[in-house]
Every structure is written in C-alpha cells, then in structure tokens.
Amino acid sequence: VIHSYAFFGLKSVGSLILCLLPTCPIKQIDPFAFFGFHTCDTILLTGIHTSLRSGSFSHMTSIRLLNLSHGEISRIHSYAFQGSEHIGELDLSSSLISNIDTDAFEQINNISLLNLNGNLIRLFEKSIFQPLVHSIRHINLDNNPIQCDCTLEWYLEQRSDRFKLPDVCTGPIGYECLSPNELQQSQLPCYKINEDNNQTTLKNLCEKRVKGIVVAKSLASLYRLNTCLFVLLTIMFISNVVI
C-alpha cells in the first residue's frame, strides 16, 4: 500500500522507480499518496493491481512522465490526476482498463501523449476525451474493443491524426466489419423510426456488405459458367465443321 502523503516533503528525487516487474506487490494507492512530492518529474510504476482512485496521483507539480503500464487497473476514477497539470506523457497501456469515469483526466491540461493501447475500453466518449483535444498530440486507443456506436459522433465531426483507433470495430452486432477511421456519420448505428410500423430498427451495414460480397461472387460464378459454356459450344461447332 502507498499511503497518503507517503512522499510529502521528499527532496532531490528527480526520477522514482517503484516497480518494473510484471507483477507489482502494490495493491492500493491512497488519495494524495504523492501530495507534496514537488521535485520528481518521472515515476515508473508498472504492473500494479489496483484501480486509480480519486486523488491517487494528485498535486504532483513537477511530474512530466507517469508510466503505469502492464498492470490490472480496471478503472480510473474521476480526478485521479487532479492538480498534476504538468503531466506530459501518461502511459496506461496493457492495464485491463475497462471503465474510465467522466473527469478522470480533469486538470491534466498540458498532456501531449496518452497511451491506452491494449486495454478493454469499449466506448470513445466525448465527455472523457474531448477536454484533452486542445493539448494532446496523440491518444493511442489501438487494440481496444471500441464499438462503432453513436458515442463516436463527436470524433467523426473532427477527425484527427492525433487519435489512433483500432482498425476494426467490435460491435454492436452487425457493425464488426467496419473501420472507425472510415466510418461516416450517416452510417452510425443509431436507432431510427421505421415509418411502416413505427418501430425502432437498427441498421446492419455488415449484413449489407456480406450480401454485396455474395452477389458479386454469384455474378463472378455465373460469368465463369457462361464462359465455359461458350468455349464448349465453340469446340463442338468446330468439330462438326471438320467432320
């Protein structure tokens, strides 16, 4: 356990390596654990097995690089980094993160790199990520099961190379074949009213794509069959002429 104010007043420490192991023995980080730790600009704490509670990494006024990768974090609570506005790079890759609270990244206004590669994040929500747009150079969300649903609408309105999303969506059903980077707003799987029976229906673009592929294959097969028949008839005609 890293208790509250564990490093308060500690001086002359520029870099702090707490864990570089695949499995870190630290199972809990209390709020304000790094409060008052003003000289440190780099913290390496990989392999931790705990969620990031509110205030866990708050008020670190000099921090530039925070590496929390390759752990089992699962959830980032609101205001986990409150008051640590100078964080420039935050590595949370490969940490089994599935839940990120609104305001989880509140007050880290100078961040340039956020690495969330290889987690279990399903939704690319505006309330979580848009506040970072003004300062961020790159957000890596590759290798996450991102859904191509209407939470992506804000991203589609302002497409940017600063966002790295997975190559293929993982849902909802019928959309797994689509690429978030090629998706259009008109293709979003939002519910719409069916004018015939006033029921809500869901588009299925993958089904249409599969049908298109099947039709194309059928036409190709028919073309090959016709070609074979033409060749056969030609041979028969030539044979009859020779005889």
Image (cartoon, rainbow, N blue to C red):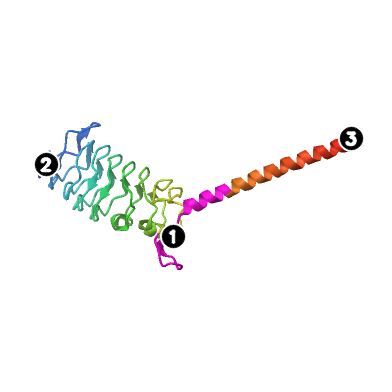
- Find residue 236 and report its image quarter: top right
**Magenta-span inclusion, residue 195:** yes
> Residue 153 at x, y = what percent?
39, 59
Q: Is residue 28 above or below residue 181?
A: above
**Magenta-span inclusion, residue 127:** no
> Residue 113 at x, y = what percent?
32, 47
Marked residue nearer the N-terminal end (1 or 3)? 1
Residue occupied by mark 3: 242
Mark 1 residue type: Gln
Which region shows up in magenta? 190-214
> Residue 104 at x, y = what percent?
23, 52
Q: Nearer the viewer, residue 94 or 133?
A: 94
Mark 3 residue type: Val
Image quadrant containing the N terminus: top left
Marked residue nearer the N-terminal end (1 or 2)? 2
Q: Which mark is residue 113?
A: none
- Residue in view at x 41 percent, y 64 percent: 192
Foreground label between 3 and 2: 3
Mark 2 residue type: Phe
- Residue in view at x 10 percent, y 42 percent: 3
- Residue in view at x 56 percent, y 47 percent: 214
Residue occupied by mark 1: 185
Residue occupied by mark 2: 7
